[in-house]
Image: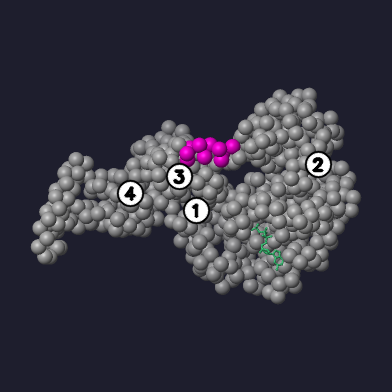
Amino acid sequence: MDKVRNFCIIAHIDHGKSTLADRFLEITHTVEMRDMKAQLLDTMDIERERGITIKLQPVRMKWKGYELNLIDTPGHVDFQYEVSRSLAACEGAILVIDATQGIEAQTLSNLYLALDYDLEIIPVLNKIDLPAADPERVAQEIETALGIPKDEIIQISAKEGTNIDTVLDRVIEKIPPPHLAGLRKKLNILDDSETKALIFDSVYDSYKGVLAFVRIVSGELRKGQKVSFLKTKIETEILEIGYFTPAYKPSESLSAGEVGYIATGLKSTREARVGDTVYRGKDRMNAAPLPGYRTITPMVFSGFFSTEGADYPQLRDSLEKLSLSDSSFSFEPTNSIALGNGFHCGFLGLLHMDIVQERLEREYDLDLIITAPSVKYEIVLSNDEVVEISSAAELPDLSLVKAIREPISKLEIITPKEYLGGLMELVTKRRGSLKNIEFLNEQRVVIHAEIPMSNLVTNFFDRLKSISSGYASMSYEYSEMREDVLVKMDILVAGSVVPPFAQILHRSEAQSAGTVVVKKLKEVIPRAQFPIAIQAAIGSRIISRETIPAYRKDVTGYLYGGDVSRKLKLLKKQKKGKKRMKAHGKVDLPQEAFLSILKRDE
Ligand code: GTP
């Protein structure tokens, strides 16, 4: 164990995590230059296109007689729990900060997490080759804000390969071996008679079934052994065991302190959950699982519908397939008058939702309509029972509702100070409350705030970027469910409620939201022979109203010239229209009307 080092790289998006990882692979001759390209291409399309890496494959490298295991942490707040499990599998972290940018929101949130796990931090300033780099200023910022002495910071260029060896040397020197730190030390594990391994990631492989990525905390795992998962209670056999080169490299065993994978033959990653404990020992019924496991539940919801109704079975099959490899999204059938059959899906966050959407569209060739994202609510009923809902349509009869709770997030924004005013206004306008404002240096500030999650999922990030000309960064984390004055806003068309248009809102927001919705509908609902009232209401109180005026009596009046047949046609159409109105007893709502309200703004 003395010669093993387990570490991860934490960085804000684009600060150079993947580039640095590539240099590590090269300098340690783990992957030869000629194979580098293939390695780089081995990521999802969406990651490549957006220039973000959601997750890198773990890899074992050799450096000066040491075994270095690099475990990646997903670079996005949506995956905070997974980040925490990856960190728990390590004893140290390389903190990469872009020397042209400085500390960003995600740098901070990941660093705090890493410190929670007592990881040894190796600070690195990247991109020093760039003319815009200002290592002195950023190093000072790191010292002031994070308390890391300036002279400990290694200045590198991941692109040009400058000082990469120094970073690896520092990993060996500063990061403790597995028995002296991390989980093993925390749990005070002294003997290896019982085997426990932490699952820090799991993937589905169509040949090998579910592969659980594990960090062995105590004992040893061997091929062919029977093991159990302490949380899901599943028992399985290790069909294959190995480590990452970064390709899967089978071996005979993995022992305490090491990182690798086990092939379980299981059919879905739901059965090998991130954070669960692989166990082998005398007493699996009473063995204590490794700490930190959580069942993660979706936070953001939206409807997925195929533009072609006929694709519904295909959509269902694709979602099922996708869920084998992604256990954190949920889906259940739903039906919409306008959009037909579809699925109500739950995600960890907006990026997660985008990833699933894009994978469905690309890998499964589906064309989708996605409804505007919403969050979950807790409804306290008059008998004190609490139910969870994720759309206004599920709201029970209001006379039975005692209170409604909504999810609140902790929010951190880092911004150049000139945008502070604008961003504070954005936060408060969205019902956020400012907690604290801290200067990182003379130029840049951190805003600590709390904000309802419902107001984060509706293009908050885009607003933040536009207010700050792209310079501000943010990270958020769910903190709690909190009661507030939340109301159901109904939309009435020609006097009757259209259920799919209902929304749950804070009372203070209902007025403006109502005005927007009725205006939008006014534009897309065609005129009828009578005026159509479009109203937004809370209970029986109308808060906003627009009226679509009736057609003129003689619709042919618009046409001049004497084309009789055309006139007749128009009159006939009008008559048919009248019949349909009668038949429905209400206004025909075109699909466009539903889309204008329900669809997610691109
Ligand atoms: P995500 O994939 O979004 O998590 O970003 P990342 O942190 O993995 O960053 P990545 O390695 O993809 O680098 C982001 C951009 O910065 C790329 O265009 C890199 O080529 C560039 N880059 C990374 N390191 C350096 C460096 O040392 N110097 C220069 N000039 N550019 C760099």
Residue ID at (62%, 59%) = 51
Q: Name the residue under label 1.
A: 457
Residue ID at (88%, 47%) = 3
Q: Mark 1 and mark 4: span between their CA atoms? A: 24 Å
Q: Disc 2 vs disc 4: Cβ atoms closer than 8 Å?
A: no
Q: Earlier in the sequence, mark 2 or mark 4?
A: 2
Q: Can residue 464 be seen in this view?
A: yes
Specify whether tag 3 is near ligand 1 (CB below 8 Å). Answer: no
Q: For mark 3, does the 10 Å Cα neighbourhood hold few (<14), some (14 to 19), or many (20 or more) residues?
A: many
Q: Which mark is residue 258?
A: 2
In the displayed structure, would residue 10 be above or below residue 299? below
Q: Disc 1 vs disc 4: Cβ atoms closer than 8 Å?
A: no
At which x and y percent is residue 497?
29, 44
Magenta segment: 314-324
Q: Mark 1 and mark 3: span between their CA atoms? A: 16 Å
Is 319 a magenta residue?
A: yes
Q: Name the residue under label 3.
A: 304
Q: For mark 4, does the 10 Å Cα neighbourhood hold few (<14), some (14 to 19), or many (20 or more) residues?
A: few
Q: Is residue 90 visible?
A: no
Mostly what secondary structure, the magenta segment?
helix
Q: Which of marks 4 and 3 is nearer the N terminus?
A: 3
The three-letter amino acid code for the residue at tag 3 is: Phe
Q: Mark 2 and mark 4: span between their CA atoms? A: 56 Å
Q: Mark 2 and mark 3: span between their CA atoms? A: 41 Å
Q: Which of marks 1 and 2 is nearer the N terminus?
A: 2
Q: Mark 4 and mark 3: span between their CA atoms? A: 15 Å
